[in-house]
Amino acid sequence: MNIDDAKIFLQNRWKNARVLRKEFPELTDWLQGEFNDEFHLYELPSGIVVSRDLARGLEKDPTLGLITPGEHEFKLGKYTENFIALDGRVIARVDSDKPTPLTKGGNIIAPSNSTLYLTARGNAFYVCHYT
């Protein structure tokens, strides 16, 4: 999958935040607002990650994203990240912690200044909330 295909795939999966809130009512508090038109595109050595911000006016807005198959490494900055799997299979770990398999609704919290490792077995959708 190339980066343009990944962008279209993400955009077509949940066309707006209302549809996402309906499918995941337990995340309604985090999923208020609407998606920005801008995409964040990452071509990593191990695959592609595409995400969109959910405009809420926060210092760091939540993001909805797509990870393509592969092993991905994310060095976090000043925000703690709550990564929640929406669809697909992801194995996640923080720094040298034990890997955690995540399926729909599963989450892992990565503290600020840590490294989050994500292994996607296929295309996987996620939402991240930052504090």
Image: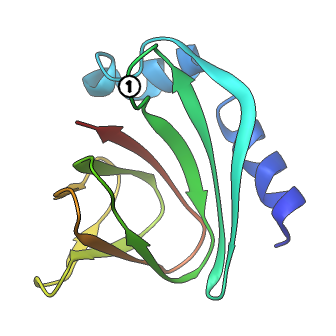
Q: Is residue 62 above or below residue 29?
A: below
SS at badge 1 = loop
Q: Nearer the viewer, residue 17 or 47?
A: 47
The N terminus sits in image quarter: bottom right
- Is 95 on the left-hand or right-hand side of 30? left
Q: Amino acid at mark 1?
A: Glu
In the displayed structure, does residue 46 sit left or right of residue 129? right
Q: Is residue 4 left or right of residue 114?
A: right
Residue situated in front as seen by the camera: 22 or 115:
115
Q: Please state, as top left, top right, bottom left or bottom right, where the C terminus lies in the image.
A: top left
To which quarter of the image does residue 39 belong?
A: top right
- Asked if 112 appears above or below 11 in the picture, the reply is below
User: Where, by quadrant of the figure, is residue 18 drawn?
Assistant: top right
Residue 21 x, y percent position in the rendering: 44, 20
Q: Which residue is mark 1?
A: 59
- Mark 1: few/some/many CA within 10 Å (<14, 14-19, 20+): few
Q: Furthest residue to the left?
A: 97
> What is the x, y in percent for residue 114?
22, 69
Identified at 33% across, 57% down, the residue is: 77
Above or below, 9 against 93 in this view is above
- Rendering coords of residue 5 (x, y %): 86, 59
